[in-house]
């Protein structure tokens, strides 16, 4: 272990060894059992390394989850105190809110991201836009045809990409069928759930730009 590793306590990890008739075996990626004694030392060393580092990763993930719950709870308690004492709420209609230190150098932001779904009106909207495309035919700008096509494409998870739909909703058109399609799109939207994201930012002085405090391992 390095000096840095000794500062962390890893989560317990299974060693991957299975006892068969008193002898240790390990399954490979296909489930085939191999006697530990015949597994090359390099592969055993790699297995131990992966499990050890994964133990640190799991411990850190659990710590971040506890930290997030701690922050959300404390901010919620502060909001409740403000509401009770002054009779006002903190944040916008979607729950977005910010907390700033007195000197303006430390900021906590909570952003609520709704997960949007689309009901059966989506098919009606698509039919209306398809009619518009057929009516305009080659006269329709390539950019507009692309916007309409992308709005109804699904992502890898089989979900409609909301960003593409928003682009289509912001297109200005005097065509009644196009505008009716936009109305059908808006009526098709409904909120499935929402998730809160907490961001920490700081700056050396009030004239400097905010710098995000990185907690996401992928962006560290």
Image (cartoon, grey):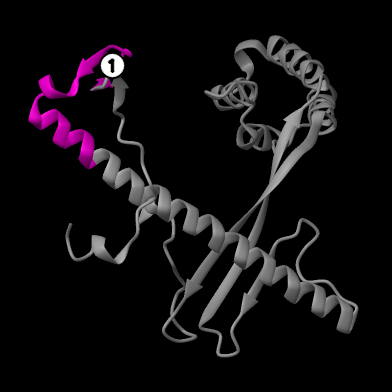
| Between 54 and 96, the one nearer to me in the picture | 54
Q: Position of residue 212 (x, y in %)?
A: 45, 66
Q: Position of residue 106 (x, y in %)?
A: 52, 79
- Quarter holding residue 75: bottom right
Which residue is located at x 79 percent, y 33 percent?
189
Indicate left or right for 78 with 49 as reference: right
Whether residue 119 appears in magenta in the rendering, the answer is no
Residue that numbered label 1 is attached to: 21
* Number of marks drawn: 1
Indicate left or right for 159 with 59 as reference: right
Please tell me whether residue 146 is drawn above or below residue 172 in the rendered image: above
Which residue is located at x 35 percent, y 53 percent?
10
For the view shown, which residue lies furthest in the front direction?
22
Please tell me whether residue 107 is drawn above or below residue 155 in the rendered image: below
| Between 127 and 109, the one nearer to me in the picture | 109
Rate crowding at label 1 as few (under 14), some (14 to 19) or many (20 or more) other CA atoms within 10 Å.
few
Please tell me whether residue 79 is drawn above or below residue 118 in the rendered image: below
Which residue is located at x 57 percent, y 60 percent?
68
- Residue bounds of the magenta highlight: 24-49
Quadrant showing the C terminus:
bottom left
Please tell me whether residue 160 is drawn above or below residue 139 in the rendered image: below
Q: Position of residue 199 (x, y in %)?
A: 54, 63
Indicate left or right for 55 with 156 as reference: left
| Between 132 and 157, the one nearer to me in the picture | 157
Whether residue 37 appears in magenta in the rendering, the answer is yes
Quadrant showing the N terminus:
bottom left
């Amino acid at each position: 272990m390095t000096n840095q590793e000794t500062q962390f306590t890893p989560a317990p990890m299974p060693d991957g060894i299975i006892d068969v008739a008193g002898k240790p075996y390990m399954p490979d990626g296909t489930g085939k059992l191999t006697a530990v004694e015949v597994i090359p030392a390099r592969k055993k060393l790699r297995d131990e390394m992966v499990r050890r580092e994964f133990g640190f990763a799991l411990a850190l993930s659990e710590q971040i989850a506890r930290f997030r719950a701690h922050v959300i709870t404390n901010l919620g308690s502060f909001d409740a105190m403000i509401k009770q004492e002054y009779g006002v709420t903190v944040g916008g209609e979607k729950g977005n809110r910010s907390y700033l230190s007195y000197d303006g150098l430390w900021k906590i932001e909570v952003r609520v991201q709704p997960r949007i779904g689309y009901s059966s009106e989506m098919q009606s909207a698509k039919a209306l836009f398809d009619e518009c495309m057929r009516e305009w035919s080659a006269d329709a700008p390539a950019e507009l045809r692309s916007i309409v096509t992308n709005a109804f494409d699904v992502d890898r998870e089989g979900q409609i990409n909301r960003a593409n739909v928003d682009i289509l909703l912001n297109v200005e058109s005097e065509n009644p069928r196009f505008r009716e399609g936009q109305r059908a799109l808006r009526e098709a939207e409904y909120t499935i759930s929402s998730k809160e994201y907490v961001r920490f930012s700081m700056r050396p002085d009030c004239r400097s730009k905010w710098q995000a405090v990185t907690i996401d391992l992928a962006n560290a």
